[in-house]
Amino acid sequence: MYYSDYNRPPQEQDPIESYHYRVSDPIPEPPKKRKGAAAKLIAVGLCCALVGGLAGGLGVWAAGGLGASTTIYQSGRAPTVVNIANVTGRDLLTVPEVYATNVGSTVGISGNVSTNVFGQTVRNAVSGSGFIITQDGYILTNYHVINGVSDIKVTLYDGTSYDAELIGGEEDNDIAVLKVDAQGLTPVVIGSSSDLHVGDQVVAIGNPLGELTFTLTGGYVSAMDRSITMSDGTIMNMIQTDTAINSGNSGGPLFNLYGEVVGITTAKLSSSGGSSASVEGLGFAIPINDVVDMISDIMEHGYVTGKPNVGILLDEVSNQAVRYGIPAGAYVSAVLPGAAGDKAGLQEGDIITAVNDAAVSSVSALQSAVKDFKAGESARFTVYRDGAYVDLAITFDENSQQRQQELNELNIQLQEEQQAQQQPGNGGYFSWPFGW
């Protein structure tokens, strides 16, 4: 944590300066005319109205009329000085201080992605945001920001650009850790999302739309512990905020007014279906307390330790099969020899329909059913096999990088066999790491 002297600017203001102007050549007065008492009363009334109006104008014009002295007042207030502040966790900062203190710790992330209609690899501008968490170059961002991106680069506020290495990620919790070859960087200070309250003011720094780099947006905590279903079916716990979060903000920091990171800006709710109503002020951030231990795991091991794994490839049961009486569930496409699923007796063609007492009707439902298990723990899987239901006791393996590599190789082998037999898969096989 870095500290620097900070003195709030003095409240005293310089005396107000005044400038006087006089009309040098007044127009001669017209010949006096006799007026009645009523006319005199009207004139006095007008003068009083004029003086009252001037007094109500905050003294911008002290007097008016031809041949009179005119005064314009100009403020002598000293401009506010914004300094980099100490983030102590005890002292409240102004919003400009939060920005000045942390903008140098925020980065833009870019890379090569396949985005055009021809499937060609092209370089995007800024695909997302991130923030520095250590002096020696570790950077935190969202997994979806770097998923499928190669040749990753990060750019700092001062324009310095670095090549970045992906250390590891956790797709289910949408976090990833990058590393750049640099020393002496300025990291953020991690706060506690558990200390937030609805109504607390928060600000985000990021790169909305990939072009409006290092933009600050602000708002309030609208709700805590929102259960949000992402576009891929993953259910995540989120901080809800009316802080503006747009494409390109993903992976950036959400700060409290102590200058601490309390969340990772991740998602924005948008209108869908047939509704024509626009959605405003509904942004979401991952609570930093939910992932801080995972971040340390990824930095040390390259993956989150303790995540469960069964060692199988999964697919969805087709709607056509369900219409013919096959139960909905997670279809086992292949079983890795020697893994937890193989030891428990899982077979290719099994359909997982329940975990303990939780019904499973899809791969995403299976994901939700096992998300709280740890490696080494056991669960009862109910599977549909040859027209009957079978219960199997499975003790989870750990979802290590080696296990993921083994599943990837099994997936490639399975696809090659299907291509050789000219038999299309059940709907696109993929390795499912039981990390959901």
Image (spheres, rainbow, N blue to C red):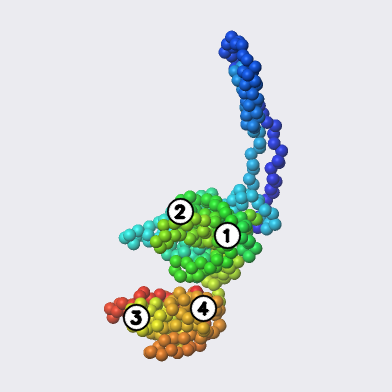
When the figure is inspected, residue 395 is found, relative to residue 238, above or below; the finding is below
The x, y position of residue 109, in whole percent, is 48, 57
Q: Secondary structure at mark 1?
A: strand
Residue type for callout 1: Ser
Can residue 278 be seen from the camera position used here? Answer: yes
Is disc 4 surrounded by few (<14), some (14 to 19) or many (20+) residues within 10 Å?
Answer: some
The first of marks 1 and 3 along the sequence is 1
The answer to whether the residue labelled 4 contacts the one labelled 3, judged by CB atoms less than 8 Å apart, is no
Question: Quick one: 167 or 213, which is closer to the camera?
Answer: 213
Q: CA distance from mark 2 to mark 1?
A: 23 Å
The dot on residue 222 is 1
The first of marks 1 and 4 along the sequence is 1
Residue type for callout 3: Arg
The first of marks 2 and 1 along the sequence is 2
The x, y position of residue 23, in whole percent, is 59, 17
Residue linked to disc 4: 370
Residue at the location (52% across, 54% down)?
244
The answer to whether the residue labelled 1 contacts the one labelled 3, judged by CB atoms less than 8 Å apart, is no
Residue linked to disc 2: 209
Which picture quadrant has residue 290?
bottom right
